Image (cartoon, grey):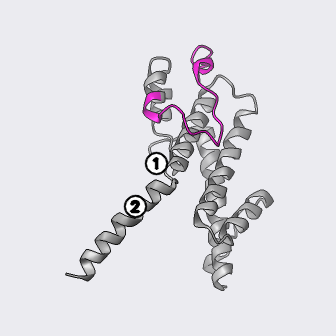
Amino acid sequence: MGNYYYLVPTLPALKSDMNEYMSLDDFLKLCKGYLSKKDYEILSHATLNGSDEVKGNHFIKEFSHFRSMVDSALIDERAKKLGLNDDEYVNKGEKENRIREVVKKAVYSNDPLESEKLILKLYWDFLEKEIGLGHYFDLTFLISYALRLQILKRLSVFTLEKGNEEFSKLFGTLKEEIFR
């Protein structure tokens, strides 16, 4: 695993409330000239939803494990909210209080947008914590950066204008189907 002392300082700092940021494609283009072929392959396949193409990277395994803990907590809390007591919905895996608290708040929120933002903030906090543990100029930092860019991209689609546009499009399609 290489150290990227010349690349990392050129990257703008990321904050979870940013509106202007580098695109993931631009970030990957910038990285391509600095990374080994193997590291670039790992970085370019790192996604928030996980990827079967990335094998053997410790940080991606940690993030995938964290995501699965969040997903299990979501299933558990949603089942409780719906009154489903079947063993199939009970989280029997590893649990963390910080995950449980955020997930519970997200599930019982009346605002789906706020729920999504809470979960994305949970991912963001995990990614920031991990790079604070001595990963300043390595592939782990770059993977975390790429994943945080993906979170910012996801958050950017949550605007009133885009939401109204999508609603109008879906409603228009529905009206057409109903009145055929």
Residue type beneath disc 2: Glu
Main SS of residues in magenta: loop
Residue furthest to the top in view is 6
- The quadrant holding residue 100 is bottom right
Q: From the viewer's perspective, is residue 100 above or below residue 17?
A: below
Amino acid under disc 1? Asp
Q: Estimate the x, y position of residue 116 in percent, counting from the top left.
A: 60, 59
Assess whether residue 18 is covered by the magenta stretch: yes
Q: Secondary structure at mark 2?
A: helix
Q: Is residue 174 magenta?
A: no
Earlier residue among tags 2 and 1:
1
Cα separation between marks 2 and 1: 31 Å
Report the residue marked by disc 2: 166
Q: Is 179 or 87 nearer to us in this picture?
A: 179
**Relative to 135, does residue 47 appear above or below in the rendering?**
below
Q: Where's the N terminus, which quadrant? A: top right
Give the labeled residue for mark 1: 52
Q: Which residues are magenta?
A: 1-26
Q: Which mark is nearer the camera, 2 or 1?
A: 2
Q: Residue at x 49, y 51 (%)?
A: 157
Decide: few, some or many residues near mark 2? Use Cα within 10 Å; few <14, some 14-19, many ≥20.
Answer: few
Give 12 or 168, whichever is nearer the viewer.
168
Determine the image quadrant of residue 167: bottom left
